[in-house]
Image (cartoon, rainbow, N blue to C red):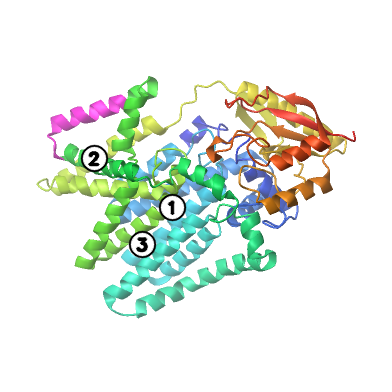
Amino acid sequence: MVLAWYTWARWGDFQIDCGRELYVPCEILRGKLIYRDFFYPYGPLAPYVGALLIATFGQHLVVLYLFGIAVAIGCAILLLELGAMLEGRAAGLTAALALLFMGFSPGIFNYAFPYSYGATIGLLLSLLCARFTLRSLLDRPGYNLLMSGFAASLTLLCKQEFGVACYLMLAFVLVMEAILRRSMRPLLHGIAACAPGIVLWVAVYGWFFWTLTPAFMVDANWVGLPGTAMHAFGANLYFHLGQRFVPREMVLLLMGAAISLTLWSLLAIARRSARNVALAIVVAIAVTHRFGPLNLITEVLTKLLVFPTGLFFIGCGFVAYSTYELLGKSGRQCLAGAAFGIFALIPAVRVFAGIRPDGYSIYFAMPLFLVFVVAMSRCIKAASPALSADRQRGLLNCLLAAEVVMLALICIPQTKQRLATLDTSWGVFHLRPEEASVARQILDFITEQKREGRQVAVLPEAPILYALTGTEAPGRWYMLVPGILSPAQEQVCLADFNRAAPDYILVTLRRTPEYGADYFGIDYDQEIYHWIESNYRMVGEFGPFRRDRRDRGLAALVYEKESH
């Protein structure tokens, strides 16, 4: 709660992604059907949860903030429980605190107002699935496997990659139990327990695919799948995020993973005085980074010790060793470790070579970070076999405490930047002064046109403007980043614009270098921009609109329909 207070209302972005988390639930409350009436690239669960919250508590940012904070706390508690099952409460507490330290950063990568609540809810549900799965292995099989199946189903309805991870974990558990017991009975029992959950997601997705056709679902919504229009632009985006498999880089990541566990083992082996000096030095580096310029040294420290970039290979090693131990000892603890390791690896593929304590990693790599903490704990114990159990526990707690302190110093955001307040119908935003001024002008303009009965469309991406003014996009597409429109869907989009004939179109200065195409109308969707210039005339601008490949913040050109 202290972190939430410290960074309150600094979350989200006025242009990128976050506006969708307001606009889509509002469209649902207007009676629109997801996928059919508006574009949505993820599972349907999160938008309907958002719509339920808004319908129950009202249109206010605080509603979403408190929900996001509750999800973050839920994820942290589940990491704590999972860590306790796999290794001990100290390991679970380390991973839980890491998530909270990273989860309240300004911008779009946080839990309070993220780029997608589908990612945060998906992580929460997948961790819940993992908890029930591990409890079925280590405690009571009974209802736990049934609940795990339901949690996996809801996860798949929320964020597909987390759902796939859940079902691969369950499949591994059921198959291995059948192999170890040399009987098909555990497999058949497990399939029966998971069947109700499977029926749920098959019914939901089946209805959408049957009603809207598979081609429409994939081509007009799930544009991130292979073979869709996003493929060309998405390849650049995914490469930028870390989903790349360059041999030389993979070797460096493997070396980094080995160095990380070696360093923690050396700290455990070292004499107390030497260990204390080493820990004092690395903590001092983190403190200096917090209050002074030591970015390069801190980055090396983070990549090798605190939050290794080679986490994926640590996870692979953990799964391989746990499976080896499982086949040798047939222990359920080994099966639990291997199953959770597989579960953690699947979503982390999204950020394979770009794992770091911010960005998409705070969602897709957090289970894998728990695997790292467990592996680190076991390396520390293996490096100090001569110590008594109490002294070994004290050593482990000391090193994990150092890890937590370094994570806090490196990951907790600083809020030195002076921000301006933007009051809206949804509550207060804290933006840079120049952005707040431009946003106020745009909101006033759209509100005035709405009062006069005129429609304003916003391109390529700022759906938050629709939500804050109570207006709607002229068609299915409320955002047009590179790759969303296939050639066929681009024609449908143009037909929507022709039919709606908005009185004004605002073209925002949204730069998208992460897709390999910077500007709307120049580097992508040129036909739509040509249509705008053929049927509208530019009559003004908000903010300094300059396409010079610099971060200019919020700005927009104003186009008025020629007939006015």
Side of 393 where 178 appears, left or right: right
Residue holding disc 3: 134
Q: Is residue 427 left or right of residue 295?
A: right
Between discs 3 and 1, the one toward the N terminus: 3
Dot 1: what SS? Answer: helix
Provide residue 179's location: percent of width, then percent of height. Answer: 29, 74
Q: Do the residues labelled 3 and 2 touch (CB within 8 Å)?
A: no
Distance, label 3 to label 2, CA atoms, is 30 Å
Q: Is the magenta stretch mostly helix, strand or loop?
A: helix
Q: Which amino acid does label 1 sit on?
A: Pro
- Foreground pick, 93 / 414: 414
Q: What stretch is highlighted in magenta?
A: 269-286
Image mark for residue 347: 1
Q: Where is residue 378 in the image (x, y as percent from the top left)?
A: 22, 49
**Can you identify the residue that label 2 sits on?**
259
Of 44 and 237, the residue lying toward us: 237
Q: Residue furthest right?
A: 563
262 on left or right of 417: left
Residue appearing at x 13%, y 36% in the figure: 270
